[in-house]
Image (spheres, rainbow, N blue to C red):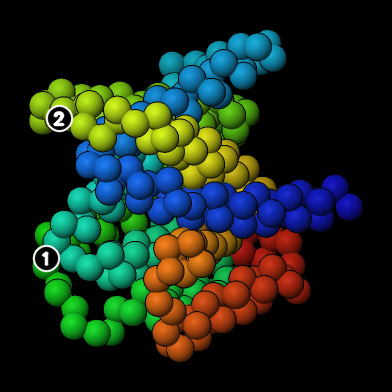
Amino acid sequence: MAGKGKMVMGYVAGLLAGMAYGVNPLFGKPLIDAGVSILTMLFFRYAISVLVIGGWSLLSWRSLRVSWREFGWVTLLGMLFAISSLSLFASYCYIPSGLATTLIYLYPVMVALLMVMQKVYPSRRTWISIIVTFVGVALMCGTGEDLDIHPVGVSLALLSALSYAGYFVIVNRVKSIQSIAPYTITLYSLMSGATLYLVCLFVLDVDWNVGLSDSSNWLCLLGLALIPTTVALLGLTISTRLIGATKASVLGVTEPLTSIFIGVFLFREPMTVVGMVGVGLCLVAILFLMVGGKKGTDGEA
């Protein structure tokens, strides 16, 4: 019963992580429209999240102690997560966002292949779910029309996917960090990511003040820090530990689903019949993965 409870918690955490990350447009779009640079937005969302988690940890007297070896691993996790976000946004400068999102969603395939290299083999059910969700995302994002394929943009999108895949695998497979609490991993990961963005801000001499004079934009930054950063990363870490890296990565399809629903219902963006088919495929794939699967069939949980 305990094992089944952990599996349910892992699936719930994975779904919530994807949905939380999917609200990025809700808070990010007003900031971009106000002229806030991508680097500024990414730095403040990470930095605010660090203050929130760190403050909560101190007030609740929770230990944040890690060894130097563990610190090295969580720092690498933060760098991977930060590189994934930065390269994704950079890819938008070269290729359509729909194509970028589709390429990013190759990361469950990359996770599965990396796990195979670790002699952990996903089940047939998991592979089918990966394929169906990828097709669904491609249909949702409308990548079949007038594609402007730029090799730099494609490379950046694939780098984002590979970095994200690396995060999943390290959380699931590196034994030296298995005893670290998820909130501790999240805190140190975000700290290293914020440091990377801070260095980029200084090196590129980005003007921090542009677009941040309005208090409503600071509320958007707070929203970015709390939901698609803190909640998403905590849920991702918990889910990966409980159900395995490959299954947790498949559940990330709730991210583009949530983004599309926000775009349709809040920003009045159009939804095509093909896009609706894609949404349906993704939902079916999630249910197929979660219902009827046996614990341990892919060697991950």
Q: Secondary structure at mark 2?
A: loop
Dot label at residue 206: 2
Left or right, 72 with reference to 174? left
Left or right, 215 with reference to 66? left
Q: Residue at 39% across / 65% down in the picture?
A: 105
Dot label at residue 151: 1
Q: Amino acid at mark 1?
A: Pro
Q: Residue at 34% across / 31% down in the picture?
A: 214
Residue 40 higher or lower than 62, as above or below: below
**Residues under labels 2 and 1: Cα distance?**
26 Å
Query: Callout 2: few (<14), some (14-19), or many (20+) C-alpha neighbours within 10 Å?
Result: some
In the picture, which quadrant includes the C terminus?
bottom right
In percent of width and height, residue 97 lies at 28, 65
Query: Residue most toward the bottom?
Result: 273
Left or right, 44 with reference to 243? left
Query: Callout 1: few (<14), some (14-19), or many (20+) C-alpha neighbours within 10 Å?
Result: few
Q: Is residue 292 visible?
A: yes
